[in-house]
Image: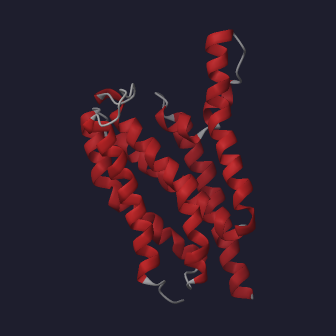
Amino acid sequence: MTVPPLHQSTALYLSWIGGLCGGFVLLLADLLPFPLPFATPSSFFSAIVVLEIFFVLLVWPLFVPSLLRAGCAAPALLVYVGVLLLFSLPLAMIGANVSSVDAAGLVRSRAHLAALAALGAGVAARLPSGLTWYLLGVFSVSAAPPFWFFLQHQLGAKAPAISIYLSPFWGAVAAESAPAWVQTGLFGVAGLLLLALTGKRKAAA
């Protein structure tokens, strides 16, 4: 197994840190011509987590095919996931401090983020030609349950009780911890399985 070229990794890390820092500045600096209703101290940590989830679900998988072509083994993609989590840890800790989130909440958010990143890497490694359908599926699963809940709240349309367990964004910011841990287990196992299968297929070839 060869080490991928440095510029591939650099583009990934700069995109990750640049996106998070850009969102961080927008939340704090009040640069937009309109106020952000969710940019409050109590929800600041949740906003940072949502930014992270957006990246690992929708942007990070786009880097995976180029990393694999450069010689990175599929299971070694977890190293990149670990580095992404390490780089974002200071911002997450600042957000947790601002929003008064305890250590358990911080650990839960890191585990949830790692599971989602592993899932994105697994899908991109195993089914690179299906990334378009993956992105469409992520959008549908992420947006449909909260919208259904909104309809329930506004119009009385009954939403399934499991809706909160389907949307990764909703599960991450839910007041209770069960949805995030359930998603961490399911998505994490699915991602690890896909990476393992991809590694075995390439080794056999």
156 lies above or below 1: above
The quarter in which the N terminus is drawn is: bottom right
For the residue pair 179 and 7, the one nearer the viewer reads as: 7
Image point (66%, 57%), residue name: 190
Q: Is residue 113 visible?
A: yes
Residue 201 x %, y %: 73, 80
| Rendering quarter of residue 84 | bottom left
Pinpoint residue 156: horizontal percent, then vertical percent.
Answer: 69, 10
Residue found at the far front of this picture: 33
The answer to whether residue 112 of the structure is visible from this angle is no
Image quadrant where one finds the C terminus: bottom right
Is 163 drawn above or below residue 108 in the view shown?
above
Q: Nearer the viewer, residue 182 or 130?
A: 130
Name which residue lies at 40% across and 37% down.
Answer: 47
Left or right of 197, for residue 168: left
Question: Who's the residue at 51% across and 89% down the image?
Answer: 2
Viewer-side residue, 3 vs 11? 11
Across and down, in percent, residue 8 comes to: 47, 77
Percent position of residue 88, x then y:
35, 55
In the image: residue 190, left or right of residue 35: right
Residue sitting at 74 percent across and 87 percent down? 204
Is 139 positioned to the left or the right of 129 in the image? left
Q: On the image, which quarter does residue 106 sit in?
A: top left
